[in-house]
């Protein structure tokens, strides 16, 4: 079982390394209506062999405003169809001699992993993972045969006793399937166990299919628990997934035996005869390796055909259960994109981290906007209120840096391509420089407090100069956010031009300050406060340029 789960993980990661960016592009572009969203979800999930990965990408696009919740629900419906391919892969693995291909494929995977091309390395990981999956299946099958579960009296007595409770038996195995899936964190693993038990003749088909239905609910419980600390949109998407599967289980339960008998007859297996004739059940047990994936596919396809017309009601239901806060308080510490632990693999996590850094930059600009309120000459009460807000933002900035950096460090523990490792290093640098911008904003507020507590105030000319410097600094922050969104070298050049303006203006004001102090226009101490503000703005501009250089991969960073 460990080999199977490890193989699934390696195979999924290898596929996502090869096609992660392209699949994200497909997911963002091909969701114009419910049908294309459905097909896109099925395609992406089948490609990466992970419905969780598709859900992660979908939620990130909802948060970014690229997808509506209704579009996301159609993608999640498609993901339920795409994930059925896993059961068919395992079914194929149970029905041919995997030893003939596994070890030659291992050699091929090793050769590809040590290739120079990153694409070939990722392909090698996929082959390697697929081999582990088939090796795990082969080992399971061999050990199940050695255990002879079909003639193990204790096992047969247990299933016979629990299978005689009628509808209660179906509910029991439904619950067992859900609990097992939550425990092992893998519906594929529980599907493999179900196939082993059914094909050995130990587990009757009705209880086996009840386990499969439980797996469908169990996998959604896992994602909902993971999304509990996420934002409302993430929780709504996870809840929509659960609503979809729970509804499917409920209507299937109403026609349970009729639906199971129909699926079995489609494969050529008589479920009614098997329930009464033990010899027939054992002789045809191998057919159950096809019955289970057929039921899994039929269940999800029928469920989609029913619910695809009710996306809007599902959206209204989940948003009523988990309402979004209309009066969103930006001064609360809350990450938007990487909370909740809803990630699947390292490659796909980069998208969430990138958007969180953009959000972090937005917060620092809002912090700078609050600092600019000191130039409105507030009274003592209002001054203290503004300073308290800046202090609060400083705490938020520190926490965001720690959370994002820890997240990126956790991502870097996975198997990554060299390009992704370089991206993480650049993003860690960006994170530190954005936090330094927050520190500069706090230092500016302290300088204003020193001036406010002094007996004399800045002259009107000084205030005019500070206002002009703040305008330039705010422009640099605005341009930085634009660069973070686009990554364009053209936008980066505009940032460098603003930085040159800030440097030249600071130099001009520094010379003017010396002349004004010598001409007794104001005291030396007031000149120190004044230049502290000007110098801090120039330092903030340097941090901005460092962020821009890291984002656009320019080599020389300002120190």
Image (spheres, rainbow, N blue to C red):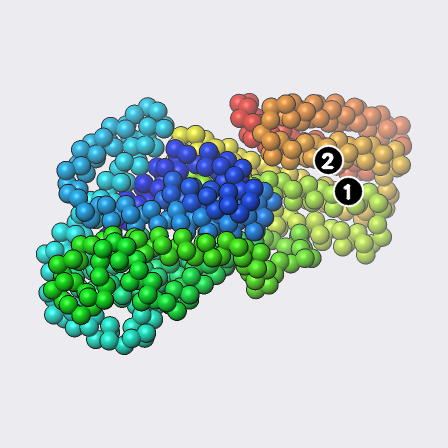
In contact (CB < 8 Å): disc 2 and disc 1: yes
User: As displayed, is residue 55 above or below residue 521?
Assistant: below
From what the image shows, is residue 106 above or below residue 4? above
Residue nearest the viewer, comparing 523 with 36: 36
The numbered dot on residue 119 is: none
Query: Is residue 324 toward the left or the right of residue 91 in the image?
Result: right
Residue beneath disc 1: 372
Question: How far across and how far down the image is residue 202, in percent?
Answer: 17, 64
Q: Is residue 444 above or below residue 259?
A: above
- Dot 1 falls on a residue whose secondary structure is helix
**Res. 186 image quadrant:** bottom left
How dense is the environment of label 1, judged by Cα within 10 Å: few (below 14), some, or many (20 and up)?
many
Q: Residues within 10 Å of mark 2 (few under 14, many from 20)?
A: many
At x 28% / y 28%, what residue is drawn? 112
> In front of the other: label 2 or label 1?
2
Q: Taking the image as drawn, is residue 516 in sight? A: yes
Picture quadrant of residue 151: bottom left
Q: Nearer the viewer, residue 387 or 11?
A: 11
Q: Judge from the rendering whether residue 367 lies leftward or rightward of residue 427; answer left or right.
A: right
Which is more N-terminal, label 1 or label 2? 1
Residue beneath disc 2: 474
Q: Residue at x 74, y 51 (%)?
A: 387
Classify residue 547 as left or right of residue 419.
Answer: right
Badge 2 element: helix
Residue 414 can be seen, yes or no: no
* Residue drawn at the location 18% of the way across and 52% of the way down: 140
């Amino acid at each position: 079982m460990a080999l199977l789960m490890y193989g699934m993980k390696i195979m999924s990661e290898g596929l996502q390394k090869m096609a992660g960016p392209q699949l994200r592009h497909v997911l963002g572009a091909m969701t114009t209506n419910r049908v294309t969203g459905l097909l896109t979800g099925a395609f992406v999930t089948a490609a990466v062999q992970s419905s969780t990965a598709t859900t992660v990408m979908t939620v990130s696009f909802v948060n970014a405003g690229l997808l509506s919740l209704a579009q996301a629900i159609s993608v999640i419906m498609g993901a339920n169809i795409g994930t059925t391919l896993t059961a068919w892969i395992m079914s194929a693995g149970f029905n041919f001699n995997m030893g003939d291909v596994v070890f030659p494929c291992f050699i091929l995977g090793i050769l590809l992993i040590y290739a120079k091309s990153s694409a070939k390395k990722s392909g090698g990981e996929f082959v390697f993972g697929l081999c582990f999956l088939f090796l795990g299946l082969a080992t399971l099958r061999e050990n199940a045969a050695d255990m002879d579960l079909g003639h193990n009296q204790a096992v047969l007595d247990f299933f016979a006793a629990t299978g005689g409770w009628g509808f209660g038996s179906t509910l029991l195995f439904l619950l067992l399937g859900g609990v097992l899936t939550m425990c092992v964190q893998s519906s594929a693993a529980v599907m493999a166990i179900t196939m082993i038990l059914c094909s050995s003749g130990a587990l009757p088909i009705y209880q086996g299919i009840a386990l499969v239905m439980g797996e469908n609910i169990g996998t959604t419980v896992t994602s909902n628990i993971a999304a509990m600390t996420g934002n409302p949109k993430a929780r709504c998407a996870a809840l929509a997934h659960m609503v979809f599967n729970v509804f499917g289980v409920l209507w299937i339960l109403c026609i349970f035996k009729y639906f199971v008998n129909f699926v079995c007859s489609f494969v050529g297996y008589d479920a009614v005869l098997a329930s009464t004739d033990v010899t027939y059940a054992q002789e045809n047990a191998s057919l159950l390796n096809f019955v289970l994936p057929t039921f899994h596919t039929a269940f999800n396809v029928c469920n989609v055909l029913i619910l695809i017309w009710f996306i809007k009601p599902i959206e209204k239901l989940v948003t009523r259960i988990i309402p979004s806060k209309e009066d969103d308080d930006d001064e609360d510490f809350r990450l938007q994109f990487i909370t909740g632990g809803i990630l699947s693999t390292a490659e796909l996590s980069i998208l969430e981290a990138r958007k969180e850094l953009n959000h972090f930059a937005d917060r620092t600009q809002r912090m700078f906007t609050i600092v600019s309120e000191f130039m409105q000459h507030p009274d003592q009460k209002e001054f203290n209120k503004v300073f308290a807000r800046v202090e609060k933002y400083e705490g938020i900035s520190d926490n965001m840096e720690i959370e994002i950096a820890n997240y990126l460090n956790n991502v870097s523990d996975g198997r990554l391509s060299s390009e992704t490792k370089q991206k993480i290093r650049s993003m860690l640098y960006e994170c530190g420089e954005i936090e330094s911008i927050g520190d500069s904003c706090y230092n500016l507020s302290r300088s204003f407090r020193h001036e406010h507590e002094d007996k004399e105030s800045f002259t009107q000319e000084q205030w005019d100069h500070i206002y002009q410097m703040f305008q330039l600094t705010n422009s640099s922050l605005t341009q930085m956010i634009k660069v973070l969104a686009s990554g364009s070298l053209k936008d980066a050049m505009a940032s460098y031009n603003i930085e040159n303006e800030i440097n030249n203006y600071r130099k001009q004001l520094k010379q003017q300050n010396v002349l004004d102090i010598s001409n007794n226009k104001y005291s030396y101490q007031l000149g120190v406060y004044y230049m502290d503000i000007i110098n801090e703005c120039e330092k903030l501009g340097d941090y901005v340029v460092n962020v821009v250089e890291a984002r656009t991969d320019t080599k020389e960073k300002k120190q």
